[in-house]
Amino acid sequence: MTVRSLNKISRKELNDIRDKTIKESTLNDFDKKYRITVHLGTCGIASGADIIKASVEDKIDRLSIKNIIFTTSGCVGFCALEPMLTIDSFDKKSVTYYSLDEAKVEKIFEHHIGKGEIAADLEPITKKSRLYDFFKFQESRVLRNRGRINPFNIDDYIANYGYQGLLKAIELNNSDEIIKIVSESGLRGRGGAGFPTGEKWELCRKATSSSDIKYIICNGDEGDPGAFMDRNLLESDPHSVLEGILIAALAIGSSKSYIYVRAEYPLAIETLTHAIKQAKEYGLIGENILGSKFSFDVEIYEGAGAFVCGEETALIKSIEGKRGMPKPKPPFPANEGLYGMPTLINNVETFSNIPQIIVNGAEWFNKIGTSTSKGTKIFALAGAVKNVGLVEVPMGISIRDIIYKIGGGISGENEFKAVQIGGPSGGCITEEFLDIPLDYERVKEAGAIMGSGGMIVLDEETCMPNLARYFMDFIQDESCGQCVPCRIGTRRMLEILEAITKGKGERGDIEKLEKLGKAIKESSLCGLGKTAPNPVLSTIEYFRGEYEEHIETQKSCERLHVKIKVKKV
């Protein structure tokens, strides 16, 4: 990368960098015949991908191989098969090797690099292999760059049409037109509530205050157990997030942004810090961006890991240096947010959608999805499913297709029981609802919420009261304690659930849980408190028999064999 701390990049140079990087990365039979990419997301590194990277570098150096481009990328999404590497060849299709160790790397170099033949006995992923179904049934838009770019190299992002959305937005020079495109796209916030993005931008653009200051906050707190969508984007494609933020700033008239990232995401923070530094060196963040009058600055704020700081007003207090506690609304942050100024808050995935919408137009985005939920959604597919990983699917796909076509079905010999959607604030969806179109309204009708995108598949061995106890334990521990219904109510619900799962439940406990749950939903101050009872209420609705059996037999979860008991609806 060329450092440009003094001579900021022009619009022409942006395109020149793209063309030059594409040319340098093109494979040919004379100079660069292979490209080896080791995938280094958090999941890969935890599985030993850094060791695989060192092994590949050592092989290239020791064998003095000259016709290879070696690079790294973030996660490709198929987390269950890490560590992985992909080989692109001049004369062959892309091949991905998985579950690697140093012996397998040796075999890859012996056959694929040395002899020009795929190491077939390693059963790599190709477009003809069964494992490719994980990718085949997805719609990669936000994740379009996964496995393709080095997140530490801004030129890679530019080569894949990065910052073209920002360039177009600057050329439009019309905030009304930018917001119109976003509104007509039908994009809804991907952080959980699903509020129309364009409408939120318009509210913030029109907001007035005692000064001209407006802030943008990117919410990367992501506290749901089992969720890792935002982490992956920040690690693997940070410039897509920055570009979305910059476009939003143009639209509402902001000059300052905070990206709120939990401190437990060290790689995401490292990658994002480096991306901001590169963007500043290129003049894409700073004064007079791309030769325009637009100036903007970005700062990372590391959160301490409180789940409640995913709620926007609590997040604002955290940045202000106060205890992260929600406050009543209105006023909404769009009118009175950070330091009392109008503030736009969207999450990581929402901002990552923006550049493509500006480049390709509203119709391109909303041609897929349902009537009320447009575009794609990323889910963290986990639990009792064969293919664990990050998946991006078109809105309107059935949950069954996600679990069985992309996820490969239930792992082991067990049967499907339910899928928990929406994290600790969500609910369980049973077999009867697996074929509903996946959108905000239909998921809510089925007893869950879309949430930020956690999707945990449960098999027949799962004890549903114990699952509810787990989520309630998490919620109670993370409650900010500000309002009585959430602070005391969740504690009482947890005590009842602990008694039931330990074989000490009493008659009437189920009714107490229902009564408490409804009271907490109706009277809690913030959205987190209002949704806290969802896992308990949904498991009681569909698996009431398991609660009753625990109480009647006085057996704990360890002593009670749980079979499938689904309420038919």
Image (tube, rainbow, N blue to C red):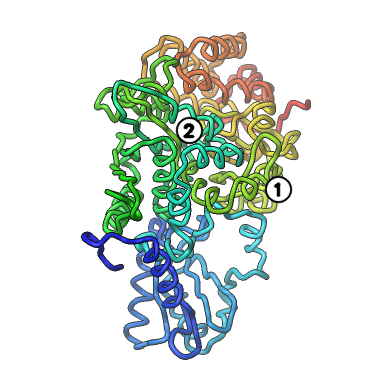
Quarter of the image for residue 375 reads top right
In the displayed structure, would residue 337 be above or below residue 105?
above
Instruction: Identify which residue is drawn at 32% across, 26% down.
Output: 338
Q: Which residue is mark 2?
A: 201
Nearer to us in this view, 145 or 443: 145
- Cα separation, mark 1 vs mark 2, equals 34 Å
Q: Nearer the viewer, mark 1 or mark 2?
A: 2
Q: Amino acid at mark 2?
A: Trp
Residue behind mark 1: 401
Q: Is residue 321 visible?
A: yes
Task: Label 2, secondary structure: give it.
Answer: helix
The residue sitting at 48% across, 33% down in the picture is 201
- The percent coordinates of residue 461 (x first, y second) are 62, 38
The C terminus appears in which quarter of the rendering?
A: top right
Tell me the SS state at disc 1.
helix
Asked which quadrant contains residue 19, the reply is: bottom left
Name the N-terminal-most of marks 1 and 2: 2
- The N terminus - image quarter: bottom left
- Badge 2 density bin: few <14, some 14–19, many ≥20, Cα 10 Å: many
Q: Tell me where residue 123 appears, x and y as whole percent.
A: 59, 72
As drawn, which residue projects farthest toward the left? Answer: 6
Residue 143 versus residue 534 in the image, above or below: below
Instruction: Name the spot of residue 241 as percent of width and height, x first.
Output: 42, 48
Mark 1 packing: few (<14 Cα in 10 Å), some, or many (20+)? some
Left or right: where 214 falls relative to 448: left
What's under tag 1, amino acid-wise? Asp
